[in-house]
Amino acid sequence: MWMRPHMVQGYSLPSEAHKHLDERLIRSLAHPVRVEMLDRFHCGIHSPNQLAQAMGIQLGHAAYHVKVLRKCGVVELVKTEPRRGATEHFYRAVPRSFLGHQDLREVPQLVRPAVSGVQLSTFVDRAARAIDAGTLDARAGTTFHWTTLWLDDLGWNKARQILAKAQADLEKVHSLSQRRLRRVDAEGVAVVVGLAAFEAAPCHNEKAG
């Protein structure tokens, strides 16, 4: 599945938002081939040669777009393998490169709903894929948890700080896992982790107990 630049599952990202997003991420999503590649990289490790075969494009084109993604800082080299006198390079997406990252929240309030739509739709799509593939509950410890909290402004800010720290801690876990996986030449398992906090819509005149 590939996603049009700045559009996922019917949600479009207004041009006003482009000016405020990370320029490297925007450049990485500026071509449909790179959008599909980034989507594939988030599902696992790939080499330009593998991507060329899977996507039906020339190896030179695949190598060029992977090079752009790496220069943009959204994919990282994880291993190399000798291939007929040459070296094949394998890459994986970095945690901060996807449309679900908190960095994309740094946009004006006017365009934030569109960004939220993009982020939510990509998360739901990942969950739907996992259900279809039978991986959603394949591992013991799969976590789904949500609840409604009644907070004042101080509590809201504290909750945001907790989630920000959790995101930073998770990225450290990713980095440490990558080091261990490189030592044993393994790919590891792609795990989708979601963090969210937002003001709930009124529902049946709910009140704090």
Image (spheres, rainbow, N blue to C red):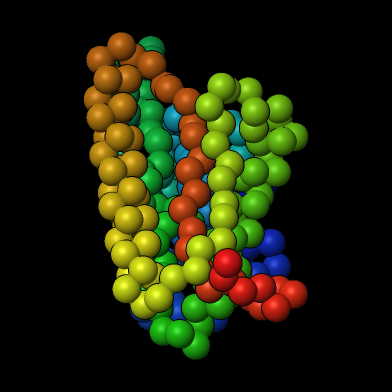
When the figure is inspected, residue 42 is found, relative to residue 71, above or below; the finding is above
- Give residue 74's position: percent from left, percent from top: 35, 50
Residue 185 placement, left or right of 130: left
**Residue situated in front as seen by the camera: 59 or 47:** 47
- Residue 9 seen: yes
Identify the residue at horizontal 51%, vertical 63% (top origin): 149
Indicate left or right for 71 with 61 as reference: left
Q: Confirm whether residue 44 shows in the render.
A: no
Residue 11: image quadrant is bottom right
- Label total for image: 0
Give percent across and percent down for residue 53.
58, 31
Going by the picture, which residue comes out furthest to the front? Answer: 209
* Residue drawn at point x = 42 percent, y = 21 percent: 187
Q: Farthest residue toward the bottom?
A: 110
Residue 60's x, y, as percent? 45, 41
Q: Residue at x 28, y 43 (%)?
A: 169
Taking 161 as reference, is 169 above or below it? above
Q: Which residue is at the front of the view, 105 or 9?
A: 105
Quadrant assignment for the C terminus: bottom right
Quick check: 134 above or below 120?
Answer: above
Q: Position of residue 15 (x, y in %)?
A: 50, 82
Residue at 28 percent across and 52 percent down: it is: 165
Give the side of residue 83 with respect to residue 165, left or right: right
Residue 27 lies left or right of residue 4; in this view the side is left
Residue 198 vertical placement versus 72 (above, below): below
